[in-house]
Amino acid sequence: MGCGSGQVRPNDPAVVDQWGLASAAVPSVWSRTAGSSDVTVAVIDGGVDAIADLQANLAPAVRCRPECVPEATPDPDGHGTSVASVLGSVGDNRIGLAGVAWTVRIVPIAATDDRGELSPIAVANSVRWAAQHGIRIAALPLTLGGDQPEVERAIVESPDLLVVVPAGNDGLDLDASGTSVQPCVQPAPNVVCVTALRPDGTIDERSNRGGVSVDLAAPGIDVPAADRRGRIIRVSGTSFAVPMVAGAAALLLSAHPDATTQDLQDALRCGARPLPTTGADISTGALDVDVSLRVLDDGSATIGRC
């Protein structure tokens, strides 16, 4: 593990291609914390496969269909595994990637029905299960159309759970009437809605946006991730910006274990780097974990950008 200019550089071979880490100032924070095994993040998706670069960080899996029971569910399409790999691949182990929080407990929660398809009631119960088991952060890299009162109710009833969700990939203005991408547009204070940045630092044209609806932008286009076999692939979409922010929240909580959900929300928002379209396409700006950590260290938003 090499260091330079206050930045930690793990020996994972694919880390040189993980452009999103530098974009979000993650290596600067690694000199302080790379996460904690006391911090648990729920990944609510179709399942997560126990690939070598994740295995040490995976907690026993759960499946909600809609009742939640302990059950390891194979990842049907690789999406959940890729999300988890960006969030919490073991770092400095000479394998694959370094996760944003490379020391963290990840609980895979498969929100699928008996046909293996995602269902809103299963998603709602997954959120409830995470909250009931004291989990503080959930990566929910899924979008649901129309009204979803059961999901909305589950999130509102779980105020101690920070729920990170994608804005979606339709090229829409979510503030416009007639657009409904759930849970992004839900106004619950514990929801962080994330859109995707390109390597050049701009919001991708296919990513949904909204000066009110979308909280934060994070790297999500052409992002290195692991597939179900542990091979490094490139993925794109707002759902892959979600683990960047959920991992950032895990780093913040590792450094400040007494932080409330509101503290984490404020730190992420006030630490954000303003973009040219802040206020129009996005509420705050681009993820900057280093400034967000300094916001928490300071005990207020005064050191931040809001």
Image (cartoon, rainbow, N blue to C red):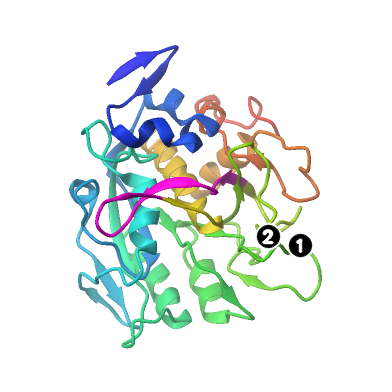
N-term-proximal mark, 1 vs 2: 1
Q: Is residue 47 above or below residue 89?
A: below
Query: Could you say which quadrant of the image residue 107 lies in?
Result: bottom left
Asked if residue 223 is among those painted magenta in the image, a careful observer would answer yes
Specify the quadrant that holds the C terminus: top right
Q: Label 2 is placed on what type of residue?
A: Asn
Q: Label 1 is placed on what type of residue?
A: Asp
* Rendered location of residue 173, percent (x, y): 76, 62
Give the residue furthest to the bottom: 114
Which residue is located at x 19 percent, y 49 percent?
52
Identify the mark at residue 208; answer none if there is no mark: 2
First to last magenta residue range: 217-233
Query: Could you say which quadrant of the image residue 210 lies in?
Result: bottom right
Find the distance from the CA under tag 1 to the CA under tag 2: 6 Å
Give the residue furthest to the top: 5
**What residue sits right under mark 1 in the picture?**
173
* Rendered location of residue 193, percent (x, y): 60, 56
* Rendered location of residue 75, percent (x, y): 30, 68
Specify the quadrant that holds the N terminus: top left
Classed neighbour count for the residue bearing mark 2: other residues with Cα under 10 Å, few (<14), some (14–19), many (≥20): many
Q: In this view, does 279 lie to the left or right of 2?
A: right
Q: What element carries label 2?
A: loop
Q: Is residue 60 above or below residue 64?
A: above
